Image (spheres, grey):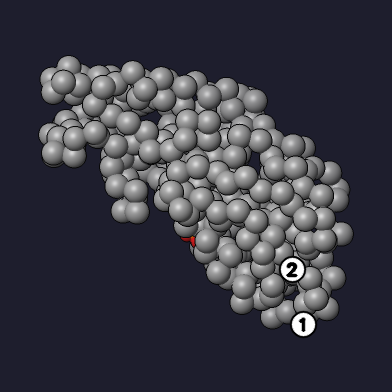
Amino acid sequence: MKIHNFSAGPGILPAQVLQEAAQGVLNYDNTGLSLIEMSHRGPEFVDVMEQAVALVRELLNLSDEYEVVFLQGGTSLQFYMAPLNLLSSTGYAAYLDTGTWAANAIHEAKRVGRVEVLGSSKDKNYSYLPDFSVPSDADYLHYTSNNTIFGTQFQSIPESPVPLVCDMSSDMFSKPIDASRFSLIYAGAQKNMGPAGTTLVIVKKDLLGKTGRNLPTMLDYQVHIDKESMFNTPPVFPIFVSMLTLKWLKNNGGLPWIGELNRQKSTCFYQALDSNPLFKGTVEKSVRSSMNATFLLNDIRLEPAFEAMLNERGFSGLKGHRSVGGYRASMYNALPLESVQELVQTMHDFAQKHA
Ligand SMILES: Cc1ncc(COP(=O)(O)O)c(C=O)c1O
């Protein structure tokens, strides 16, 4: 049976990438060695790293003002590392509280210095995006472009008179963006890029080295930049698979191509959701996420029957996060349009049966 993988993360990767990754683990490029059992300083892995960085630069059209590194510690480490590198001891950072991950970012930044929360949607279980205005004396503005758990997404990049810092973990590489608007972008690999275990960090050079803080070596962006992501042993496998996924993305038409495909998938899903009498979305329509669609059954007594139907038809990963309940359809880059069409057909069939 074909499985439709709607997992929120680690998420679906292209089948072709999985095959290339498997081959690279067994026998990398006919070297007779596995990619994961050779030196990260040897020519083979150095080439993988260089290709990965070059693909990030090309896909996002990054200028020389930006550095690209692959780090460890997940996005959660960036919640602390970003303020440590950017927040001055006399200034303050502005944050938007739009979900669990945004709140975690705020929590960690407060360990480093002063934080002002400009707006929060916590009062309605993060089902909308708050209004805010950005003060011009903040060190930076931090926001989460896509709220993976609650299913809201910024529909455009916020206007900001101060450097913009973004946790882009769950919509990175999902559509064309103007990267030049950002001073720092970070994103865990495990949604649109590769396996868990590496975090992509893109930082504008002129922002660094201004806090006067004596940083721990591993938490200093400049160290990783100077050592080209090889201060210590990098996570070779996640970086390898990320490189393969980025190559897949480029060869298929890059961000314009994937942006259009993702638009088709989310339009297909939300139109069907809005016309189905048994289901409802959980967030304000104008800020619905193209990556993570959250929805509920109006009558929760129907959940066991719906879940049985999903299982019978090969759907995986649709259970909603415990803080929202219901269901979450994560439609990351590698999810085919057909999987979304099958899902809406199943929801339709379910409604026919139970309406
Ligand atoms: C938007 C966002 N930020 C941060 C995280 C946390 O990432 P990690 O588990 O790599 O620390 C996630 C994980 O799902 C996420 O979706």
Percent x, y of residue 9: 42, 48
Where disc 2 sits, the SS reads strand
**Residue in the foreground of this view, choosing between 141 and 344:** 141
Query: In the rendered view of the protein, which quadrant contains the C terminus?
Result: top left
Q: Measure the alpha-carbon separation of dots 2 and 1.
A: 18 Å
Q: Residue at x 30, y 26 (%)?
A: 343
In this orientation, does residue 69 appear?
A: no
Q: Residue at x 67, y 64 (%)?
A: 116
Left or right placement of residue 275 versus residue 238 in this view: left
Percent x, y of residue 53: 70, 49
In this orientation, does residue 144 appear?
A: yes
Residue type (three-letter) at the residue carrying disc 2? Tyr
Where disc 1 sits, the SS reads loop
Percent x, y of residue 174: 57, 35
> Badge 1, how many Cα within 10 Å: few under 14, some, many 20+?
few
Q: Which residue is mark 1?
A: 214
Circle on res. 92: 2
Q: Does residue 31 sit above or below 106 in this rendering?
A: above
